[in-house]
Structures are given as C-alpha cells and as structure tokens.
Image (cartoon, rainbow, N blue to C red):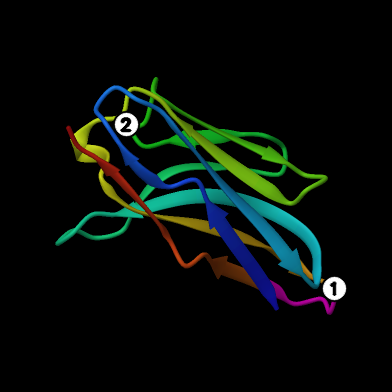
Amino acid sequence: QVQLVESGGGLVQPGESLRLSCAASGYIFSINRMGWYRQAPGKERELVARITSDGITNYADSAKGRFTISRDNAKNTVYLQMNSLKPDDTAVYYCNVNGMLRLGSSYNSWGQGTQVTVSS
C-alpha cells in the first residue's frame, strides 16, 4: 500500500555528519506524521525525531541540538540531518510514516532501515 525507500546511511567518524532520506510512495491520499526511529544492538527501538504535516517537530533529548528533521510534502519525503555524530548514535535508523490512503483507510508504514555507524 505504502512503500518507504530510505537512503543516506553509512560509516562516518565521530563529529561528522550524515543526511538520511525517506521517500514514500503508493496509494497515498495524505501524510500526517513522518518520523525517524533507531534501534541499536540489544536495545529497543526509540524515537529520534518526528514532524507533523503542519511542521511541528519533536526530538529525543539525545538528538536535540544536533539533528534536524524536515519534510518535502511535494515529494512525500522526510529528511534527517545528523551533525556532530557520536558512537552512541550507531544504530539502524527506521523511517515511519502515517496518514490516509486513497481508499479511505489509515496506514502506518515502516521502512526497512538504514545502518548508521559512527566509529573512528
């Protein structure tokens, strides 16, 4: 119904930056909230940042001041700019999107994840 394609992960050194992208496609009527979550080995999945259709954002404390979430509604795409990366940011990052389908039902979709590794 809704497909999410993530990109932008990789291996960087501490202090460097990465930009993640997630593009949604399918029978989308509207997109409400778009967000990024992450899961480190042995830990539960946690919220990193999310943004509503009105542009209201919220961030995990660990992301405040370093990460910026944004969206391009024309492209159904959400971005996560990550600066000053730390080894603790190492995780698989997942995109999450929810909204309404053209058929009138709601959806809540997850991407397949992109690996971010911060290591010297």
Horizontal and vertical percent position of residue 29: 83, 64
Residue 59, by quadrant, is top left
Query: For the image shown, how many numbered marks are present on the structure?
Result: 2
Q: Would residue 119 appear left or right of 102 to someone viewing this image?
A: left
- Quick one: label 1 or label 2, which is nearer the N terminus? 2
Secondary structure type for disc 1: loop
Horizontal and vertical percent position of residue 17: 40, 28
Check disc 2 and give the amino acid type: Asp
- Identify the mark at residue 61; answer none if there is no mark: 2
Mark 1 lies on residue: 102
Q: Nearer the viewer, residue 76 or 51?
A: 76
Q: Nearer the viewer, residue 13 or 96?
A: 13
Q: Would residue 101 appear left or right of 61 to someone viewing this image?
A: right
Which residue shows up at 60% across the image and 59% down it? 97
Which residue shows up at 65% across the image and 70% down it? 3
Check disc 1 and give the amino acid type: Arg
Which quadrant of the rendered structure holds the C terminus?
A: top left
* Mark 1 vs 2: CB contact within 8 A: no
Which quadrant of the rendered structure holds the N terminus?
A: bottom right
Horizontal and vertical percent position of residue 38: 35, 52
Q: Which contiguous range is marked in magenta?
A: 102-106
Q: Would residue 38 appear left or right of 59 to someone viewing this image?
A: left
The reply to whether the magenta stretch includes residue 112 is no
Q: CA distance from mark 1 to mark 2?
A: 36 Å
Horizontal and vertical percent position of residue 47: 38, 48
